[in-house]
Image: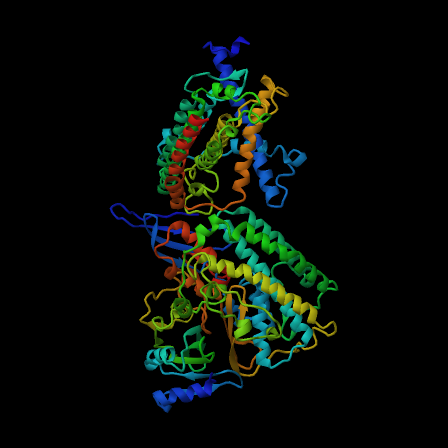
Amino acid sequence: MNLFANITSLPSILLHAAIPLTIILVYALVAIWGERKIAGFIQDRLGPMRVGGFHGWAQSIADLLKLIQKEDIIPTDASKFLFKFAPFMMFAASYAAFAVIPFSSGYIGSNINIGVFYLLAVTSLLTLSIIMAGWASNNKWSLLGGMRSAAQMVSYEVPTIATVLTVIVVTGSLNLMTVTEMQAGNDTLGFLPNWLILQNPFLIVAFIIFFISILAESHRVPFDLPESESELVAGYQTEYSGMRWAMFMLAEYADMLLLSLLGAVLFFGGWNSPFGEFMSGPTWGFFWFMLKGLLLVFVMMWIRWTLPRYRVDQLMHICWSILIPLSFINLVFVALWELIF
Amino acid sequence: MTTDTENTIGKREMTINMGPQHPSTHGVLRLELVLDGEIINKVTPFIGYLHRCFEKYAEEVKDYSKVIPYTDRMDYVSAINQEHGYVLGIERMLEIEVPDRVEHIRVIVAELQRIASHLLGIGAFGLDLGAFTPFLYCFTEREKILDIFERTTGARLLYNYMAVGGLMRDVHDDFKKDTTEFVKTFRPKIKELNDLLSYNEIFIKRTANIGVLPEKVAINYAASGPVLRGSGVKWDLRKNDPYSIYDRFDFDIPVGTGEVGTLGDCWDRYIVRVRELEQSLRIIEQAVEAMPDEGDVMEAIPKRIRPKEGELYVRTESPRGELGYYIISDKSANPFRIKARTPSFVHLSMLPAISTGALIADMVSIVGSIDIVLGEVDR
Amino acid sequence: MKNTEELFEYLATHFGEDLFTIEGGDIGEKWITIPAERLKEVAKFLRDDDSLLLDMLMCLSGVHYPDDNELGVTYHTHSTENSHKLTFKVRVSVDNPVVPSLESIWKTADWHEREAYDMFGIIFEGHPNHTRILCPDDWEGYPLRKDYVPQEFYQGITTRE
């Protein structure tokens, strides 16, 4: 289909913009319902049951309708433009990064050669929007919460980048499409898929560090102290209500999906089927890719409802004293392994 | 949570409020924190938001037995233990002998209530630290206990079950069966709780070496219950100053040992509560076995309660610590003065002494570990 | 392990017989009444003396005796080492209810004394934070006194039905 070629005509651009947006919105509705259901089952209860009939599947839609019709409250002395702009910028940052995610062999939003680099650069706008939200609220505690969140995100970007770098060392290309294509086939040890995580044992360590870092990047427990409920400060989101707050939530879930999909691409073979030729092809590829991403999202939710949360200084200690040295040492080992084998 | 600031331009310290509304079940408590960055320099608790004039009511109701529903409502989480202390005091003033069956039933419901109260304390503590799931597991078990109470007394939370000299009504027919079944299903859950929360690395990092209460300070502040036992002092009123029939039962007193941190830190106080669950189960098992099947629970209840002139201080071990009633009688049917000495009141006054130098996140940990109930603090 | 009479005799040997009186009702426990001027000295002795070691102040209550027109404070102490208990009281007149504060001896007394002040109006000399604790700071009157009548208006809201 030539609408999917790299032509910059207006209908093509709009189509490329609409597809990830649809995926994000549908995913967000399903993920929020899913999170409440998963929380319920882990906690030995049922979760939403009524809205819509079967296990409350329409609960997210009902929540969305409720949030849309809420009163729009802006604090009197807040910086009006920045206050209104911050949630949209946060969503835009996560959304823009979806342009380089290879959803299947037939479709990628933008097949650029610096895919990963672009993704990591754009997601750093998230940090900026959090500071913007905290400052524009004219609330000392929002500001402090926002600064804490920003410090956490900035710190944990280093292990994320380091682990992504280890994968790039193996693949030699920043283009995510190429990275996925390299993982096609089932040659590892005869029958296992060619996923990168199975090629190099140190990449398993890299994946673990990567997973912990993305938990911290998307403010999930055990690293969600800046926005926890029983903490003193409710975080940068304090003064936001109704649809503006919903944008923050949407951005957070989109971020979760983005980073999980990135993990799926880098470590688990992207849209490649684990069975080789069986069940593969452009549409199957999309299915496998989303399955892997959603599985990682599920693990993130599972961890949230199981573990308590860390204190801010302990969180920073983990990042700077443990994860960063570990990820760089791992980089050296991965490179050595590649050299030898 | 409301936040309040003074005009702090130019000052390094900030004064902020934590409360009076809290997201956990502790109640309406206001803590004024003076902060230097994240470190707390000074904390001042403000109470009185839940003051319901228990002591004034006790003087104005025209009968000693009418005070019993009010004692329920002081510490609404462990209501039976409050009643137990009070009726024990009045029985000593009247010099009444209570039948054996009544004593056994009282011990069983008191220990069941102790388990229920500890489950709430443990669950709420985990919830404050971000562990959402153990809270719900504890509440599932607590529901089973509340079901037993509902079948026995008619109420789930505030019972008005004990009377001076006996009980308001006899237990239901399946009481022994229900209780034995509960003990059987609950034992493995304690191990589950330990696996999920107690030895979790993150939980230990949030609670060990925080809020350390040295033994001498604890005794000077008259701490009691799990707070005192967490600091290593083997002091339990059921063993050191036995009341009712506790001297007939065989159980241990768990104390804190500084297992994962310093002696007397938040983790020690927490683990004492978890270990006490097992000991309460032992007491319940022995009491159910020894309970006589025959006997009227209402035979020793006096028609009129008119103690002679005098005064008494009676103390019992409630789940939170030493619950004391200071009762003065002046020969009339009205109490002259009833003062309730509640453990949470005393423990909350210790807060400034154990939390200087802590971070804000630690404040949540410390308040959760001393397990206060504001109904008891304010009465 | 001593009972109240033995403790009384021991204290009498130290402070002299006529300083204390031992009293009791028809039922219940006995207590010692100490004059207010010597209270702090005696309390320190009770806590620190080797054969007494009354290191825990369990309870401190205010009482209003309308017939004698006096306010009293009752202290219940006990010893974790020696397992004995002692109850002692102080009586002061309603017109000049000043009692020395024992907050420096047993820290339990800190909040209990504030409550006694709040409820009865007993002034504790030397208390570091002598403010109301349960009632609001601008409340008038002392609620637990027998002759207490609640104020009509509190900050513009009526207190009666």
Q: Is residue A5 above or below residue A207?
A: above
Q: Is residue A215 above or below residue C105?
A: above
Q: Is residue B41 above or below residue A20?
A: below
Rendered image coloring scheme:
rainbow
Instruction: Tell which of A194 and A18 is nearer to you.
Output: A194
Q: Can residue B113 be seen in this snapshot?
A: yes
Q: Position of residue A42 (x, y in %)?
A: 59, 43
List the single residue furthest toward the left: B10
Q: Horizontally, is A244 left or right of B41 in the view?
A: right
Instruction: Tell which of B147 and A167 is nearer to you.
Output: A167
Q: Position of residue B139 (x, y in %)?
A: 59, 52
Q: Horizontally, is B16 left or right of B203 in the view?
A: left
Q: Image quadrant of residue A47?
A: top right
Q: Image quadrant of residue A173?
A: top left
How many dots with numbers? 0
Residue occupying image coordinates x 46% and y 47%: A230
Residue occupying image coordinates x 43% and y 30%: A334
Q: Can residue C59 be seen in this snapshot?
A: no
List the single residue furthest toward the front: A340
Q: Is residue A183 above or below residue A141?
A: above
Instruction: Tell which of B364 and B230 is nearer to you.
Output: B230
Q: Position of residue B22 (x, y in %)?
A: 47, 51
Q: Horizontally, is C27 left or right of B99 in the view?
A: left
Q: Image quadrant of residue B82?
A: bottom right
Q: Position of residue A106 (x, y in %)?
A: 55, 15
